[in-house]
Image (cartoon, coloured by chain):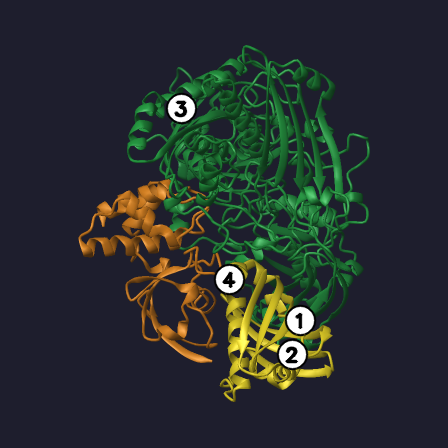
Chain colours: A yellow, B orange, C green
Amino acid sequence: MDMSGSYRIGAPRQAVWTALNDAEVLKLCIPGCEEIEQTSPTTMTARVVQKIGPVKARFNGAIELLNVNAPQSYTIKGEGQGGVAGFAKGAADVTLSEDGGETVLEFEARAQVGGKLARIGSRLIDAAAKKVARQFFDNFHDHLNGKDPPGD
Amino acid sequence: MTNVSMTVNGKAVSREVPDETLLSEFLREHLRLTGTHVGCDTSQCGACVVHVNGKAVKSCSTLAASLDGSQVTTIEGLANGGLHPMQQAFTENHGLQCGFCTPGMIMTSVDMVNRYKADGKELTAQAIRGELAGNICRCTGYHNIVKAVEDAAAKM
Amino acid sequence: MSTGIGARVQRKEDKRYITGKGKYTDDVRNESQAYAAFVRSPHAHANVNGIDTSAAMAMDGVIDVLNGQQLTGDGIGNIICGWAITSKDGSPMNMGAWSALATSKVRYVGDAVAVVIAETQALARIAAEAVEVDYEVLPAVAASDKALAGGAALIHDNAPGNLIYDWEIGDGAATDAALAGAAHVTELAVTNNRLSPNAMEPRAAVATFDECDDHYTLYTTSQNPHVARLVLSAFYQVAPENKLRVIAPDVGGGFGSKIFIYPEEITCLWASMKTNRSVKWTSDRSEAFITDAHGRDHITTAKMGFDAAGKIVGFKVDTIANFGAYMSLFSSSVPTYLYATLLSGQYNIENIHCNVRAAYTNTVPVDAYRGAGRPEACFLVERMMETAAREMGKDPTDLRRANFVQEFPHQTPVIMAYDAGDFGANLDQAMAAADVAGFAARKAESAGRGKLRGLGYSSYIEACGIAPSAAVGSLGAGVGLWESAEVRVNPVGTIEVLTGSHSHGQGHETTFAQIVAERFDLPLENVSIVHGDTDKVQFGMGTYGSRSGAVGMSAIVKAMDKVEAKVRKIAAHVLEASEDDIVIEGGQVKVAGTDKAMGWHEVGLSAYTAHNLPPDMEPGLKEGAFYDPANFTFPAGTYICEVEVDPETGVTDIVQFTASDDFGTIINPNIVEGQVHGGIAQGIGQAMLEQVVYDDDAQLVTGSYMDYAMPRASDVPSFSVHHASTTCPNNPLGMKGCGEAGAIGSPPAVINAITDAIGSNDLAMPATPQAVWNAIQAAK
């Protein structure tokens, strides 16, 4: 599955970049994220619960940042094992550009699912991924503007 | 664990079961009424259909605990001795082969005929086919099932 | 009312099914039952670098977690394919190792790596989720042509290029020459879509090891419990045959998928011994999609040449068959001896050549599914005939008639010797029943409503009644395909028939009893059929390949011949008459032309009291027989499909489906017609709805009934089913087989009808509304 998008975030580029590299901020903003831990400047481990159609799974995964070009761009790559639900992996090229005092974030993402997620949820992956992405950026924008999403 | 009490085939039953117990599991594993079958895990095939308070329900997607106090009828309890006209029609019209989908087919069809009769609507062959959308049979090609339902509808 | 041959007898087995008293494998529950759940690969291709079972083992109620190293360490053998195919260069087929639990590598999504045995099914499944497997993911391939192309991931080390065999049949040079000299050559590329059998009862196994007797009992969803026992014993070394009882109780459909012996049955038996518990496994539908053998999946290109008069002069076929990740039990025979040998269709063709390459891919193993090879052959031949007729501007029925085999026996250039048939009679009957004469008016009426109406034919032939043992042995089969029966007359005259055929919906308890009741002129209820238990029935080859009638019932006839001979001797002795004068009728054994008679039950009693038997006669009245058929049988017929297509949406309605079949002698028309109905519905499913889809990473994306479109009641019409029969000369009842014909004959009729309606020949199965709409747009 391929997906791309562009979001305008009401904060300066440096602030956006810092937040995108902050495990605590990511934990707050990634929908369903239960735990995230920075293991090195460019790697993290995470636990995320996602529901795709009838399949609900807790993914234990690793996140890696590649091609880091602060504060303009990086590639964020993740891979999660969801037990019998299968696995999900993907990568997104993220670019930040300044526009006035705000920042335009553009991304191109590729994702792949396997196991039960693919067998039962494949039709629903695109919609689910778009929804998760939109929620993430909404949360992220809100966070940088002092409104944190309610934790669950 | 939850205590579930209901009336199944006219008999009061009460069992202590895990909260997540489905009605199909309750019937098959706790009451050992194995006439109710499970043919899929996405509530599409209809092999598990039973009647709850007189209406057809897919027992594989209903929590037993949610039916506390209900009246449940399974294929084993459809007729009091003898055969229900729908059961009779299925055998007379050769509306079954391997028999696995048959309990669900019969329970769905009895409910179907009851509803059409209550509403005074005509149950055409086309309507029967539409009403069977939630019941899959792999053996019969449905031809004789439709004939059986038409036959039983005339006798019920 | 007659209950004999040809009577529409209501089924004896129905009562238990319609009252919920059927006993299927999942209904079996032993004392202190333990449950198995399998840990399955979510990856299509990966090395297994480690399995961490500690978290699962630590759970309360988990009895054990077992893996492939332990299984092979205990000497459990690899799963085998029982039919050896030799490549055209003389080399044997390249069979890769298949362990019931993977040891070092997984090769498809669903490949099992470990099994959890726990106190409840729910707990077993939760614990299976806690088993952590360290996978090293490898590139994967799902499509057979890509698997054979250079550079694809290598699936088995001993199958270079993922090629299992490269096989051919027929005379290639002669066929090429015939095509070169042809007045017209039609070329066609077809894909036969991959299907999932989907018997409504998911597979299940309950295995119980008895430590005291060192004995195993297996309840399983099998079409052939004796073959299961043989293979489990001889090849997988689970237990010697005398220490293994296999019971297939009521079985909820099979369609081929329950022929094979799968990893789960083997594992449950072994795990029962390891844990000293009765172990039960029941598949759910999601698991069925990734463990039950799939069917079909051919990619074919073909050329058929005609002379100026429209006679076929040559037929050349090139096929790639997708075998999935491992070779299942009969997989190798399906695209060879069950496919290429039927490429002559109903036609007199002098030159045929077919080349088949079998490919490993990272998908579920592929094996026999209703029709097994013959639907693929029929689809190709009948699409070819219709396409050629359109190209040459001929009526498709005229082209068929001009090429029909007229004289029998007929030897085709691809092994088969057709024994009997009247193909023109079936075509005539179908055309009359379908009112082909009135089609033009119906088409005009549809056009008036903006709809496209089309008519499609399929004149199919198949080979079933599988099979003459010596013949299949010479072609590589590892087993003989005879059948056995034992007829026991009790001292009170009632009869039990023990048969190696197994019923999983076919109604054997009724039809088998009918032939016995007719032969001895007894009430139907005096005859019981016993099957499905290796402790009761001595041996049998089971039910598949439309063989229970032509082979299974023939064995019963042979045993009845022996019973009758003994009855005559006893009666002649007691009644002091000549054996030749004895007649059996009306529940009596009589001396013809006299009033001397004894009751049938008195003959039974005489045999067992043994007070007054002929000298040297053994007491008792029980005879067994093994019947080995002399030839395949060749059911044939014509199917006509009429469709109406909405050009705005591509939605296609089958407005009429007409069948004329030649099944030889029919024992019970209800049951035969039911088989045809079900077969046609499956064929319509293949033609319009069903397809197993893998994505580019070999992930299965049609893993439930939300995405795999099963035919529902509103997807199929009522069927118009007719019979015009010739008698099969090669078995005592004159029977052919009826179990697969519907699924074999119907797909090309549907596609021929839709392509006729839309005026474009470029349409693949399944012809979904989207596919039909696209074909209409592309043709504009």
Image disc number at residue A46: 2
- What residue would you read off at disc 3? C430
* 10 Å crowding of disc 4: few (<14), some (14-19), many (20+): some
Residue C556, picture quadrant = top right
Q: Position of residue C612 (x, y in %)?
A: 53, 30
What residue lies at 39% left-to-right and 27% top-to-bottom? C722
- As measured in the structure, the alpha-carbon distance from the residue carrying label 3 to the one carrying label 4 is 45 Å
Looking at this view, name the residue that lies furthest to the left.
Answer: B120
Amino acid type of the residue that numbered disc 1 sits on in the rendered structure: Gly
Q: Is residue C763 left or right of residue C280?
A: left
Nearer to us in this view, C253 or C319: C319
Q: Tell me the amino acid under the disc marked 4.
A: Leu
Q: Are marks 2 and 1 on the same chain?
A: yes
Rendered residue at 30%/55% (across/down)? B81
User: Which chain letter goes with mark 2?
Assistant: A
Question: Does residue B37 lie above or below C379 as drawn?
Answer: below
Residue C632 in picture, x, y percent from top left: 60, 26
Q: Nearer the viewer, residue C207 or C335?
A: C335
Query: Is residue B136 left or right of C421 when viewed as pictured?
Result: left
Pointer 4 residue: A124
Q: Are discs 2 and 4 less than 8 Å apart at CB?
A: no
Distance from label 3 to label 1 (Cα)? 61 Å
- What whole-number distance in Å separates the C-alpha atoms at marks 3 and 2? 66 Å
Say whether disc 2 or disc 1 marks the residue closer to the N-terminus: 2
Which residue is denoted by mark 1 in the rendering?
A78
Identify the secondary structure beneath mark 3: helix
Q: Quadrant of residue C471?
A: top right
